Every structure is written in C-alpha cells, then in structure tokens.
C-alpha cells in the first residue's frame, strides 16, 4: 500500500524519481520494494522498464526459496526478464545452452546480456562462438570479445561467475559441449605453446585437487593470447 506525502517530494519530476529508483534497484530487490511503498510517485517510478532492467538479482544461494512459489515474485521476475535484465538473461541463456540444448536461443540471449555490459555473459558468448567450427566469422568475433575481457582483466572472474551459476542452479543437470581438436583457436605454426593448453589445464586441475600453489595462474604467463583462449575453452567445457 502506498501513500501520498504532503511535502516537497510530491513535486519531484518523474524522471528524477526514475533515476532514484534505478539507483535503489541496483542495491537490492528489498530496497526497491521499500522505496516503492514510500509514496505513489516512487511506486510509479518503480514500474518503469528501465528500473526492472537495472534490478540487482541475488545469486542462487542467496535467493529465498519461497520466491519461486510466490505469484507476485514470479510476476516481478517476469517483468525484469521482459525488460532485458542482463543477469536474468545470462542465467536463462545458460539454461538454454546447457540444459535445454537450444544453442541459437542461448547465444541470442548472451548477445543481449553482453550488450548491456554483463561481463560473464560476454565471456560465455566468446567461448560459445570460439567453439563454433562452422562459422569462421563468428569464431573471430568470439576471439575479439575474449581480447576485450583479457584487456579489462575480467576473464577469471567471469569464468567463476559461470561456474557458480551452473553449479548452484542446476547441479548434476548441466551438459557442457565437447571440445575437439578442430576447436583449437591458435593456428600459428610458429607458436611454441600451440596445442599444449589441454596439458596445462590438466596440470592445473590436478594441482588444485592437491591444494597446490601450482593450481593458480591459469594461462596468464602464456604470451600467445590465442593459446590463452584455448586454455579458457578447456576450463569452460569442464566448468560443472
């Protein structure tokens, strides 16, 4: 229930209320609900698509279990999804790709989420495009996205985000794509590390099982960015 306040806030323009609602929505869903209950102007501003697009979605392990049973909560998340909330697009894209096996639908959703600045979606998109052997242009686009993430220092964090969503949302249900020799990104005959990334990944994985310091570093020391992409492809298909 909302109330109209007989004060100066009643004269705040609606676009200012929307800016306030967006700022609050990026904090938490609970904060947005509290704002919307403060007065009618705040409630109306909170109904805007741009606000639903900006809502901060909690990680699966921090989401109250009863939200999935509450009709109002379901309606709210449907609104966020329809508005193009990048986090929800990212999660639904992973579901389409690795649960329902709808690759084209999943890639379209990753494109929408990454265009709105979602780093993990951009990482997953780069991996899926580099795994496509039938579209060389898309494979090159995947490598370009990978270069951008590498330059921004977002690779490790994005890989971890994909891992957390896949393992927390659908444990035991995920079917990751297989990686074959034709998926190799580095094609330079002069590259001394070409073809060795599966061995490096296996070495890091075994070191992690022993809690060894050699598990850290991924392929950061490899000068060839295409080989680093090959390493990340190994890490990506072995996520769950």
Image: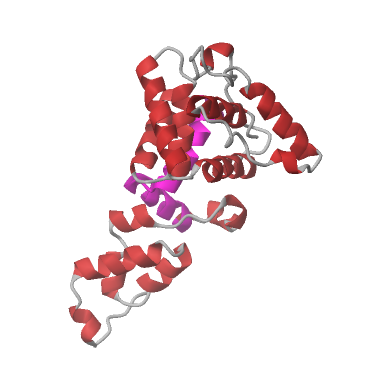
Q: Is residue 192 left or right of residue 36?
A: right
Question: Residue 97, relative to residue 1: is it above or below?
Answer: above
The quadrant where residue 110 appears: top left
Query: Dividing the picture into quarters, in which one does residue 156 lie?
Result: top right
Residue depicted at x 81% and y 39%: 210
Magenta residue span: 72-101
Residue toward you, 145 or 239:
145
Q: Who is closer to the viewer here, 24 or 191?
A: 191
Residue 234: name its quadrant.
top right
Where residue 193 sits: x, y (%)? 59, 21
Give the vertical position of 55 relative to 97 (above or below): below
Image quarter hosting the C terminus: top right
Predominant SS along the magenta part: helix
Quadrant in which the N terminus appears: bottom left
Which residue is drawn at the image coordinates 49% and 21% (left, top)?
Answer: 131
Among all residues in the image, which is located at the extreme bottom? 7
Q: Is residue 33 visible?
A: yes
Q: Is residue 99 magenta?
A: yes
Q: Position of residue 179 (x, y in %)?
A: 59, 19
Single out the residue that lies furthest toward the right.
Answer: 210
Q: Is residue 1 left or right of residue 230?
A: left
Residue in the image at 53% along x and 30% along y: 223
Compared to residue 76, the image places residue 210 above or below, namely: above
Q: Position of residue 224 (x, y in %)?
A: 51, 27
79 in magenta: yes
Q: What residue is drawn where x is 31% and y is 80%? A: 3
Where in the figure is residue 27, as x and y percent of width and height? 44, 65
């Amino acid at each position: 229930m909302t109330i109209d306040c007989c004060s100066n806030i009643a004269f705040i323009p609606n676009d200012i209320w929307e800016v306030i609602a967006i700022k609050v929505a990026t904090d938490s869903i609970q904060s947005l609900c509290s704002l919307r209950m403060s007065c009618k102007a705040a409630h109306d501003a909170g109904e805007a698509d741009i606000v639903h697009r900006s809502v901060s979605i909690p990680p699966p392990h921090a989401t109250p279990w009863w939200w999935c049973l509450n009709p109002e909560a379901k309606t709210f998340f449907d609104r966020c999804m329809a508005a193009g909330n990048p986090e929800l697009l990212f999660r639904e894209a992973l579901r389409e790709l690795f649960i329902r096996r709808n690759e084209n639908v999943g890639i379209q959703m990753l494109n929408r989420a990454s265009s709105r600045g979602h780093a993990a979606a951009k990482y997953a998109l780069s991996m899926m495009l580099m795994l496509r052997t039938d579209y060389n242009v898309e494979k090159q686009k995947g490598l370009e996205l990978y270069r951008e993430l590498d330059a921004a220092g977002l690779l490790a964090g994005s890989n971890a985000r994909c891992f957390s969503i896949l393992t927390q949302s659908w444990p035991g249900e995920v079917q990751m794509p297989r990686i074959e020799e034709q998926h190799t990104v580095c094609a330079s005959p002069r590259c001394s590390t070409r073809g060795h990334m599966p061995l490096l990944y296996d070495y890091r994985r075994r070191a992690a099982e022993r809690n060894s310091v050699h598990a850290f570093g991924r392929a950061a020391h490899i000068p060839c960015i295409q080989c680093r992409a090959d390493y990340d492809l190994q890490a990506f298909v072995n996520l769950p």
